[in-house]
Image (tube, rainbow, N blue to C red):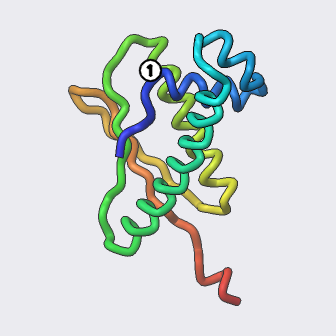
Amino acid sequence: MELFSQDKQRIVLERERGHTLQAIALRRGISYQRVQTIVREAREHIDRLEMHLLVSRKEGVAFGLAIPNQEQQYRAIALDYLAWILDRLRARDLDIEVTTKNTSEGIIVFLEDQTNYSEEEE
């Protein structure tokens, strides 16, 4: 599973920082409805990530996100967006372990669900 495009990541992060839909839309030259759609898609992205993590845990396979090599400013945006993803997942009471592996093409960020689900059953 890949991260959102750089433009979408920026929009989501701007919204997270408290910028209004209208202000973001004006800066980006798009409609506020488009901004709203991108923010909704980001929430849906978190839903899919959570599902992938649960399936990966059940199947005992690794789950990773790729952050390709890129200019420093774009890499910073991708890492900020990754932090946003982790914050959202942890806000859902998921215990996520993060490990990274550098490659010639960038970084692979492995996410593993370490949540103790047996506590919830008690």
Location of residue 16 (image quadrant): top right
Q: Residue at x 56, y 41 (%)?
A: 42
Q: Is residue 105 left or right of residue 33?
A: left
Rendering coords of residue 58 (x, y %): 38, 74
In the rendered image of this protein, does residue 118 appear above or below residue 8?
below
Secondary structure at numbered mark 1:
helix
Residue 50 percent location from the top left of the image: 51, 59
**Which residue is rendered at x = 30% and y = 33% of the image?**
102
Instruction: Write down the residue under mark 1.
Output: 75
Total marks drawn? 1
Where is residue 31? Give x, y as percent: 63, 21
Q: Residue at x 64, y 45 (%)?
A: 87
Q: Quadrant of the C terminus?
A: bottom right
Of all residues, the one furthest to the left in this rendering is 104
Q: Quadrant of residue 21?
A: top right
Task: Report which quarter residue 38 is drawn in.
Answer: top right
Residue neighbourhood size for the residue with mark 1, other residues' Cα within 10 Å, grouped as few (<14), some (14–19), many (≥20): some
Q: Which residue is more in the foreground, 87 or 46?
A: 46
Query: Extreme bottom residue here?
Result: 122
* Image location (x, y in percent) of residue 117: 59, 78
Point 45% across, 58% down: residue: 112
Give left or right: position of 38 versus 57: right
Instruction: Identify which amino acid the numbered label 1 is placed on.
Output: Arg
